[in-house]
Amino acid sequence: MLSVLNRFQKGLAKTRAGLIEGINKTLGRAASIDAADLDELEELLLSSDVGYTTTEELIERLSQINNQATAEEVMGLFKTHLIDVLQSAAPTAEKPTGSSPPHVISIVGVNGTGKTTTIGKLAYRLKAEGKNVLLAAADTFRAGAIDQLTIWAERAGADIVRSSQGGDPAAVAFDALRAAKNRKHDVVIIDTAGRLHTKTNLMDELIKIHRVIQREIPEAPHQVLLVIDATTGQNGLLQARRFAEAVHVTGIILTKLDGTAKGGIVFAIARELKLPVRYVGLGESLTDLEPFDAGQFVEALFQ
Ligand SMILES: Nc1nc2c(ncn2[C@@H]2O[C@H](COP(=O)(O)OP(=O)(O)O)[C@@H](O)[C@H]2O)c(=O)[nH]1
Ligand SMILES: [Mg+2]
């Protein structure tokens, strides 16, 4: 079994290769940091999608320290600042505690970001913790979506509530909550259609699903997790804003970190969306989902 740190390291290999090796090269070359080095570092950070604000802060802080600073000291400064950026987004959405089961998690995001896959992985994690998990196949829009979720439910050992394609997604969510109450499930995870932020009718449908859920359990959905594909960079941020305008997003799941050199997007998400990253996807199999830990993540990035 790999440790959490090792798993992050594996998933972040591409980002580390681009960003950290680049930083090391720049810092290792010169005895002291000059303006050209700062420009190079700035370019590296921006091209890793760390985001403009955080990049400027890092460069500002670097330019203030003694230009005889060792590479290690500079890395230390980077680490501390980046952990701060991630942690500053965390307090906004603590997990609600104390409410009676089922705990309802709604998974939203555009097509192809990895919602259905992530639900399978998340169900598997929760099952491993001893939770009784029910999946709701409320993406009745996309062909094959229901069967795809059914396969993940089998893999994860979770139950599923489904209708036929083209059915009313709010009705599926409603049936799932009723079933979960009757059959004493601890957690319900709702798969939703990949609503393109330009398709207002689909966004309205999402709002309707949440309204139906809330009528059944007033404090639900307890979590609304927005799935962002890390390989889509700034475009993912744009999508996220549209979703956040329509529904009360409580956290982010960032998928496909293993497939990109631009894992720096995690810092831009924390900074610009002010939403905590709850989980990260590090591959396509059942075990490739990790709860996000700012300290371990940054450590893995820099090691
Ligand atoms: N490499 C990698 N691929 C992923 C990850 N998460 C999802 N995928 C892939 O992304 C594609 C779309 O996933 P899917 O769950 O169908 O997305 P949905 O349309 O949002 O439900 C599939 O091929 C998944 O295997 C991840 O963390 N890493
Ligand atoms: Mg899907």
Image: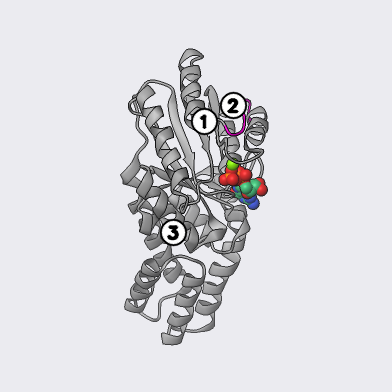
Residue 297 coordinates in the image, percent (x, y):
49, 53
Callout in the foreground (3, 1)? 1
Circle 1 sits on which residue? 168
Quadrant for the C terminus in the image: bottom right
**In front: mark 3 or mark 2?**
2
The tag earlier along the polypeptide, 3 or 1, is 1
Task: Mark 3 and ligand 1: say if the CB distance to the nearest ligand atom is below 8 Å.
Answer: no
Whichever of labels 2 and 1 marks the residue nearer the N terminus, that label is: 2
For label 1, the crowd category at 10 Å Cα-Cα, with few meaning under 14, some 14 to 19 and many 20 or more, is some
Disc 2 designates what residue? 163
At numbered mark 2, what does the secondary structure look like: helix, strand or loop? loop
Q: Which residue is mark 3?
A: 238
Residue interval drawn in magenta: 156-166
Q: Earlier in the sequence, mark 3 or mark 2?
A: 2
Question: In the shown orientation, is residue 116 left or right of residue 50?
Answer: right
Discs 2, 1 touching: Cβ within 8 Å: yes
